[in-house]
Image: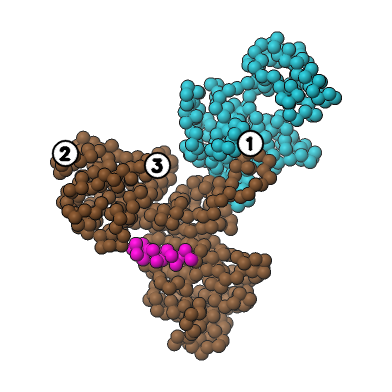
Chain colours: A brown, B cyan
Amino acid sequence: MSDIESSDIFKFFHPKSVAVVGASSTEGKIGYAIMNNLLNTGDYKGTIYPVNPRYQEVMGVKAYPSISELPEPPEMAILVVPGKYIPDVVEECGRSGCQNVVIITAGFSETGSEGKALERETLANAHRYGVRMIGPNCLGVFCTEEGLNASFAHTAPKAGPIGFISQSGAICTSVIEYAVQENIGFSDFVSIGNKADVDDADLIRYFGQDDRTRCVCIYMESVPDGRKFYEAAKEASETTPVVVLKVGRTEEGAKAASSHTGALAGADSAYTAAFNQSGVYRADSMSDLFDASRALAYQPLPKGENLVIYSNAGGPGVISSDAASRLGLKLAELSEETIGKLSEICPPTWSHGNPVDIIGDADVERYDKGLHIVLDAPEVDAVVCLLAPVSIADPLEVAKGIVEAAKTTDKPIIASFVGIIAEESENYLERHGIPAIEFPERAITAMHALMMRRRYLQGGDA
Amino acid sequence: MSRAQELIKKAQKDGRTLLTLDESRTVLEEVGLPLTKMSFASSAVEAGKLAAVMGFPLAMKISSPDVVHKSDVGGVILNINDEFEAQEAFEQIVMNVDKNAPGAQIDGVVIDEMVKGPELIIGLTIDPQFGPMVMFGIGGTLVEVYHDVTFRLVPLTERDALEMMEEIKGQGVLDGARKMPAVDRKELAKIILGVASVFEKFPQVSQVDVNPLVITKDGLKSVDARVVL
């Protein structure tokens, strides 16, 4: 058994059997949606056990009155029964030998003191039997490798290298929608709700060990244990980049601080410190979160800091160089030799510098040749490829050229075909692992994430 | 037990959470914080002699448990440049305080080395979620207005301390902006790590302000410090 298989998180994503407690045949119920997803949206090969005393079968699958009456303890149980039954069901899971429980049901600590008490009782029962618990108040879990969709989302994410964790179920469904269009794929996808037991730290550690996950991507409102998160992130960062969108930056109200330092330490200062110290890339927006995660998951790290902005137009180039300067990225200084080579294929009006503007009349051939010249240049470590749509250069052909060029180098490439979203050219790039982002400044953010990761691993001698 | 540990124990016994300047200085001196020279005089003659040993310019402040706002009662004199001025300043301060705060107990005066230069801050606090943290940034009385500070969790590495210096907007002052003396960043990192080690050496401490930490041509010097238990 490998390390990861012995992790108590493993079976949340790779269970050989799943029980759905509160499974329903009535369309519109959550117990129906979960059964439907398990049966119909993936190609999950494990055994599915609907549990509900009111049914003989659910959607053609034999149902059981309770967890303890199943022919075997399920490796994972999804709970959708009303909150008041949850502590008992968790106890029953523990007694019968089921160690992994996902509680979809809401109405716990997020609602007030009664809910808090119910959550404490549930957690105490879980602890008594060594049961690990995701939720309550969550959307569920996905594992693309197993074709497992144990959630009530209406659609499932595609397979890929990103491990996703969200405190908000609503963000999960939005992210799936977005990611499907942008060809962003996931290894595992978790909605963790109230984090009563399993929290970000547990999952970060798990993803850090998981070979399929090349980047951990997190939407976070708060963490239950700051130090635990910090230690886990620091450990995982050694092998796997972590990107976090941490929201709720608003400072706490006036507090009785007896020092300047106490007064200056807002609620966000500690998060920022923990992120900086553990190599976490902090995203400021949902677009940052995915631009950074895509770059880190799909592209190699640069070997140095020298970036080239390669473009067939001036405007996007300037937007990019402004963004690069704002983020403290260094533009490569091109050698005489590189400038000479570019001059041979460009009209005399080309920029003769970086951004490399090969001029709007560039056809596919010039775009291709120029790209090879900058990628081959030893003074260049990374390239952002911009394309302003023009009739003379077919975007799909340019995209194919970029994909071919990428095969000849280990330098990272981020593309922005400015204004183009989810068209053939963009899809082609994305399906071949080149992040294609509709606006140039966002492509720079993606590159920034790669550069910051490099600096972190280098030990900060930037 | 070190002198600082004794002072902390004593403050705890007295039910105080705020250490005096003297006690705070003792604590921070034990973790390697460079301090300005400071001495105490109970007569004009003594003040003159001590001043001559310390060098100039100096500042002098009343030492009295009854006076809170020292400058309001004429209890502070700055820019003392020789031994004679030091004697005069002592007498002037005692006279001012007698007149403006009649009946106040006068223990003597504190004589301070006067330093000038860009001001930094190093602080410690405990976050309810993440535990002990160290702060570094631009100091002075307007520190809360500029809010140019950054944090790290404790313990931290030298690299963390060096990164903190790069994170503040005003980092130019460290390089010697406008002919000011530049800071040895490695030395400053050592001081930050030293202050952070207060949490480990003195677990009773909950907050520290070293403000200002002044950049002088002779290196960094802490002028004022506050330790809270």
Please say whether residue B162 is visible from this viewpoint.
no
Can you tell which of label 1 and label 3 is closer to the viewer?
3
| Left or right, A461 with reference to A431 | right
Q: Quadrant of the N terminus of chain B?
A: top right
Asked if disc 2 and disc 3 are in contact, CB closer than 8 Å, the reply is: no
Q: Chain of mark 2?
A: A
Q: Position of residue A99 (x, y in %)?
A: 54, 72
Q: Chain of mark 3?
A: A
Q: Quadrant of the C terminus of chain B?
A: top right
Name the secondary structure under disc 1: strand
Name the residue: 64% across, 20% down. Answer: B113
| Left or right, A248 with reference to A237 | right
**Mark 3: few/some/many CA within 10 Å (<14, 14-19, 20+):** few
CA–CA distance in space, label 1 to label 3: 32 Å
Name the secondary structure under disc 2: loop
Q: Which residue is under mark 3?
A: A326
Q: Which residue is under mark 2?
A: A348
Give the extent of the magenta segment.
Answer: A170-186
The amino acid on which the numbered mark 1 sits, given as a three-letter code, is Asp
Asked if disc 1 and disc 3 are in contact, CB closer than 8 Å, the reply is: no
**Mark 1: few/some/many CA within 10 Å (<14, 14-19, 20+):** many
Name the residue: 55% across, 42% down. Answer: B151
The amino acid on which the numbered mark 3 sits, given as a three-letter code, is Arg
**Mark 2: few/some/many CA within 10 Å (<14, 14-19, 20+):** few
Name the secondary structure under disc 3: helix
Name the residue: 21% across, 53% down. Answer: A390
Depicted A218 relative to depicted A277: above or below: below
Asked if the magenta segment contains residue A166, the reply would be: no
Q: Which residue is under mark 1?
A: B209
Residue B22: image quadrant is: top right
Q: Position of residue A149 (x, y in %)?
A: 43, 73
Name the residue: 15% across, 44% down. Answer: A345
